[in-house]
Amino acid sequence: MSNHPEYQYLDLLRETLEKGEQQVDKGTGVKTYSVFGRQIRFDLSEGFPLLTTKRVYWNGVLHELFWFMSGQSNIKYLVDNNVHIWDDYPHKIYSEKAEKRLVPTMTKDEFIAKIKDDAAFAKEHGELPHIYGESWRRWPAEDGRTVDQLGWAIEELRRDPDAHNTLVTSWNPQYLYSMARPGEGARFPICHNMYQLNIKHGKVCLQLYQRSADVFLGVPFNIASYALLTAIVAKILGREPGEFVHTFGDLHIYENHKEQALEQLSREPNPLPKISFNHDFDSLDSFKPEYVTLTDYVPHAGIKAELTVAGGYNKDLHGA
C-alpha cells in the first residue's frame, strides 16, 4: 500500500534520519539530525491519521487537546487523567526553587503525586502560564481583557464560511526567550505555534505551522491532535472535516531516537482507524472528551523513547 497516507510521515522520518544536518541543542547538549521546511497532508475522509506503525497514546491526544481547547494551563487536569506528557516542565521549575531552598526537594514522582492529591499545591506549582490553552482561549490583551481566539475563529466561520482570516496563534513575543522582560519568559517551548481554519468544498480544513518538530516522538501526537481538532470544529459548525495540512519549520530526530526510528521504518502501515462522535455538541464549551469514539485502531506495538526537555528557555542565551 505505497499510497497509504502514513507513508508521508515515514518518508519524513527516513529523510530526517538519513539526510538531516547534525546540530546540537544549546540547552542540553543533545545532538539532533535536522531538515527544514516540509509539509504533509491528510484527507480526513480517508481515515483518521493516528499512526499505525507504532501505537500512539490516544488517551494523551484526547485529553491534551481538551486541555488546550478548554483554556486550561494547570497540569492537574492532565495528571488526574493519567496524562504525563507535560510533567517535566513544572517539575523543572519547582526543582530550581528547591535548589534555592525555597521549597522542599522532591523527585518528579513525588511532585506529580503531590499535584494529584493536593489541590492547593497544584494551584501553586502546577500552573504553566502562557501555554497553548491560555493563548487559544484567553490571550492576554494589553487593556486587561482576554481574547478567545479559537472561539472567535469558529464563530467567524459560522457567520462567513468564505472567511480567510480565521487564524489562531500561540506565539506571543512578550513572553518568549530574550524578547521577554527579565523573569517573565515562558519556561517551555511553544512548538506548534499557529494554525488557520478554512472551509473548502463545504468542509472544514486546518493548516498547522509547527516551528520545531520532534519527528519521532512528538509529530505522531501532533498529527492526531490537530486532525482531531479539525473534526471537532467541523462538528461544531455542522460540517464534515476536510483536509489537515501539517507544515513544518525545523524537523529533527534526537540522536538517542535513531534505533527506535529504524525499527518504526521497518514496519508496514495498517489501515487507518476512524473517529466518530457519540453525542451532539455545537460549541467548544459543550464538547467533552468522552464524546469521541475511536474505532478500528490496529497499530503495531509501541516504541519507547525518552523525552528530551529541550528547545525552550535557556538562561545562558535568554537572560535570568
Image: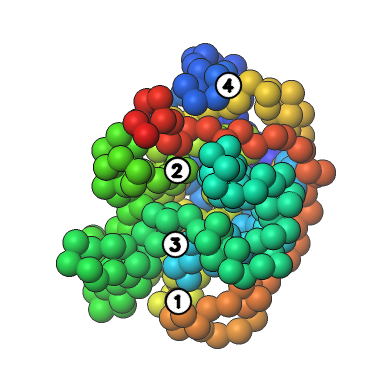
Q: Residue at x 50, y 36 (%)?
A: 213
Residue picked out by circle 3:
133
In terms of sequence position, does the residue under pointer 1 or pointer 4 come before the other? 4
Would residue 83 be found to the left or right of residue 181 on screen? right
Residue lying at the far front in this picture: please name it: 101
Asked if disc 1 and disc 2 are in contact, CB closer than 8 Å, the reply is no
Classed neighbour count for the residue bearing mark 4: other residues with Cα under 10 Å, few (<14), some (14–19), many (≥20): some
Pick the front one: 114 or 253: 114
Residue picked out by circle 4:
30
Label 2 SS? loop
Residue picked out by circle 1:
284
Label 3 SS? helix
Residue 51 picture location, percent across and down: 66, 47
The residue under label 1 is which amino acid type?
Leu
Residue picked out by circle 2:
187
Label 1 SS? helix
Classed neighbour count for the residue bearing mark 1: other residues with Cα under 10 Å, few (<14), some (14–19), many (≥20): some
Asked if disc 3 and disc 2 are in contact, CB closer than 8 Å, the reply is no
